[in-house]
Image: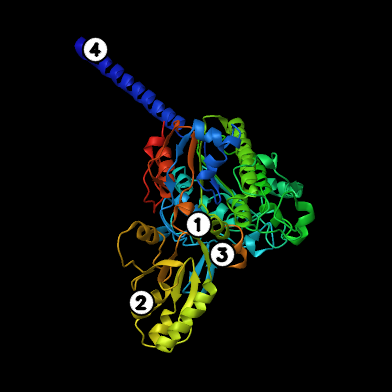
Amino acid sequence: MKYFYSLMVLVVFSNLSIAQNSAVTNQNLKSNNVNERPKLVVGIVVDQMRYDYLTRFYNKYGEGGFKRMMNEGFNCKNNHYNYVPTYTGPGHASIYTGTTPKYHGIVGNDWFDRNLGYNVNCVNDDSVQPIGTDSKDGQMSPHRLLTTTFADENRLFTQMRGKTIGISIKHRSAILPAGHNANAAYWFDYEDNRTGNFITSSYYMKELPKWVQDFNTSNAAEKYFKVWNTLYDINNYTESGSDLNTFERIFKGKETATFPYDLEALKSKNGNYKIIADSPYGNSLITDFTLKAIDAESLGKDDITDVLTVSYSSTDKVGHDFGVNSKEIEDTYLRLDLELERLLNALDDKVGKGEYTLFLTADHGAPNVPNYLKSERIPAGLFDESKMFDDLNEFLYKKVNVENLVLSRANNQIYLDHKKIEENHLELKDIKKMTALKLLKYDLIGKVYITSDINQFEGSEGFLENLLRNGHNQKRSGDILFVYTPGVFKDTSSNRTGTVHHSGFNYDTHIPLLFLGKGIKKGQTFQRTEITDIAPTISAFLGISFPNGSNGDPLEFVFD
């Protein structure tokens, strides 16, 4: 009996000890999991940022912006887009979904919808109402995005307790990164003499939160109607070309595209608030709004990870106006560097240094202005797509005696009228072949690709073919894809000065990728990385499901 009693005591104490150890272990696991996850993930996209803007302007950057990310974080120096076309909508979608337009469905900023019979915008949604404006610019949502983002997956993982907020000048740049179940996406109502407010849509809420209303009534935007001059002595801007040249757009009301720019005096002839978006002060306004959002939404204030997506769009607008070799683009990046420092300092203060994880990348790059390249004896040119469209319809009419077989041209793609081809008992593959052979005869078109009847690729497995395939969605893309030779733009009145982007060439695909903060080690690599690697990298770090269409690879070498 004494032995039995002793044995029972031993079993009880052993079980108690096991239970206590198990509780301690579980608590440690819980503590470790909490400590491993950052309180806030911040994704920064700089619209139209070439990789070499990091190196070209490096010596003029301060220590707290780009340099801090490069020197304290991890720099992927050979980061590329792995599809075409390289536009803003597809870029932002691909960064956050971890896949390409082939799967997420955002094949351009706009594309031809065969069912509707007209071009659609990637985020336009007539089923929702504008909030904060009467403009149709508020009728936007992510309904055309076919896959989840890592922000969506974080919301699902945290049972919707982790917040997601998207912010940008452009609607598509705020909406697509934030995903389907975001708490909010906000963008700037600036086009065509609009309100100058940050707005949203009824997809997210019934009315703007008080903090957004207060921001809108604080004249935060109006204070940027001021003189834009160079941040430093313009004579020190040796990394860019002459301020006076023929390669840049001239604002209405000015005689030359040269510093300074009095935005107050120029606003009435240049869309009022639009001129703020077209200057580096649009980026300053985004930082102002972002800092308010961090406080008002209590982002990063607890142990449940939040996601903040920020897109700086004014770099793109300045690039389109003035080109990649301009004094204006150099000044815009030097000023953006200060905005990034302001944001990083605020994150250190509000969330805590070492408590957030951040990445910075771009939605595409940009080439030099064709006329500038030609002046330096580099092949380049402008191609008249409107004339080509008419030529193709005339050509096909002469071949098969049917009018207007080409419905649309968008994103370097030709959409044929399948219904009319069928009604006239024509073979779709024959029309495709005729059209492709005609396209290939144009001097500035280097390659033409035909899709099959179900819009799948026919052709080899070359590098360019893979980029085209990754950008091709069977239901949304065209029947024929064509590729310009390097340095060629679509010829429009606005494209004859400044820059554009769309191609699979390095000037459009090679963009920065910087990681900084919790869990990120200091380092760099020349190993090729791709834009679709970002979302699975963040997802792996957070321990959450990858976005449901993701096909990129986690970049384990960036982790500490």
Foreground residue among 209 and 271: 271
Q: Does residue 398 lie above or below 244 as drawn? A: below
Q: Disc 2 marks which amino acid?
A: Lys
* Relative vertical location of residue 68 with respect to residue 277 in this rendering, above or below: above
Picture coordinates of residue 462 (x, y %)?
32, 58
Disc nearest the viewer among 1 and 3? 1
Marks 4/3 in contact by CB < 8 Å: the verdict is no
Residue carrying label 1: 378
Report the side of 13 relative to 473 (left or right).
Answer: left
Image quadrant where residue 471 sits: bottom left
Mark 3 closeness class: few <14, some 14–19, many ≥20 residues within 10 Å: many
Mark-to-mark CA distance, 1 and 4: 93 Å
Tell which of 180 and 328 is nearer to you.
328
Relative to 250, is 101 on the left or the right? left
Query: Which amino acid type is shown beneath numbered disc 3?
Result: Asp
Viewer-closest of 7 and 128? 128
The residue located at (71%, 60%) in the rendering is 194
Residue sitting at x 67%, y 60%:
191
Rendering coords of residue 240 (x, y %): 60, 46
Kindly state the secondary structure of the residue where label 4 is placed: helix
Q: Nearer the viewer, mark 3 or mark 2?
A: 2
Disc on res. 125: 3
Labels 3 and 2: the sequence-earlier one:
3
* Mark nearer the N terminus (2 vs 4): 4
Residue under pointer 4: 6
Total numbered labels: 4
Which mark is in front, 1 or 4? 1
Q: Is residue 293 in view from this perspective?
A: no
What is the number of the mark on residue 433?
Answer: 2
Quadrant of the rendering where the N terminus is positioned: top left
